[in-house]
Amino acid sequence: MASQNPEVNCHDYLPIMANKLGGDGLIDELCNGFNLLIDSDKGVITFDSLKGNSASLGLQDLADEDLRSMLSEGDFDGDGALNQLEFCVLMFRLSPELMEGSKLWLQEVLQQEIQDSV
């Protein structure tokens, strides 16, 4: 089946959540999202569990190809599924605004470290 949404445009809510919840709260919410999507028998997100539970995240209109692409994008260990760490990393990677904010924060920390060491 061809992708119905070759360029899925989703609003990036992660930065809003990060500002509202703080770092620990954001991680808790990502873990909750992970738990909504997992295959309860395997403890990971599989294609079938993602497809079956995607409506709970408003992703019911994504084609199978898009769901497989999401899985492969985050599957670092190549097992065909997403564990909790892979899912959280994927969510951060899919949030350009949050990633840009993280880069700026890292640059500030590194600059401060350099200044403190001189």
Image (cartoon, grey):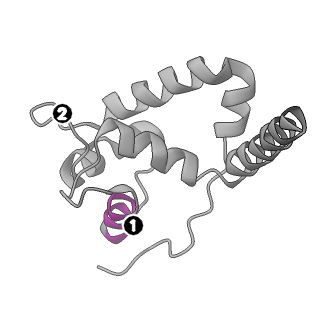
Task: Please state the horizontal and vertical placement of residue 47, each as a whole percent of the image.
Answer: 23, 55
Question: In this rendering, would 37 be left or right of 19?
Answer: left
Residue at horizontal 68 percent and vertical 29 percent from the top? 18
SS at badge 2: loop
Task: Please state the horizontal and vertical placement of residue 100, each as a whole percent of the image.
Answer: 75, 51
Question: In this rendering, would 23 be left or right of 39?
Answer: right
* Residue numbers of the magenta segment: 65-72
> Along the line of sight, which residue is nearer the eye, 60 or 109?
109
Give the numbered dot on residue 32.
none
Q: Residue furthest left?
A: 41
Task: Please state the horizontal and vertical placement of residue 86, each as a whole percent of the image.
Answer: 37, 46
> Along the line of sight, which residue is nearer the eye, 103 or 111?
111
Disc 1 residue type? Asp
Magenta segment's dominant SS is helix
Q: Residue furthest bottom?
A: 2
SS at badge 1: helix
Q: Nearer the viewer, mark 1 or mark 2?
A: 2
- Residue at numbered disc 1: 66
- Mark 2 is surrounded, within 10 Å at the Cα level, by few (under 14), some (14 to 19) or many (20 or more) other residues, namely some
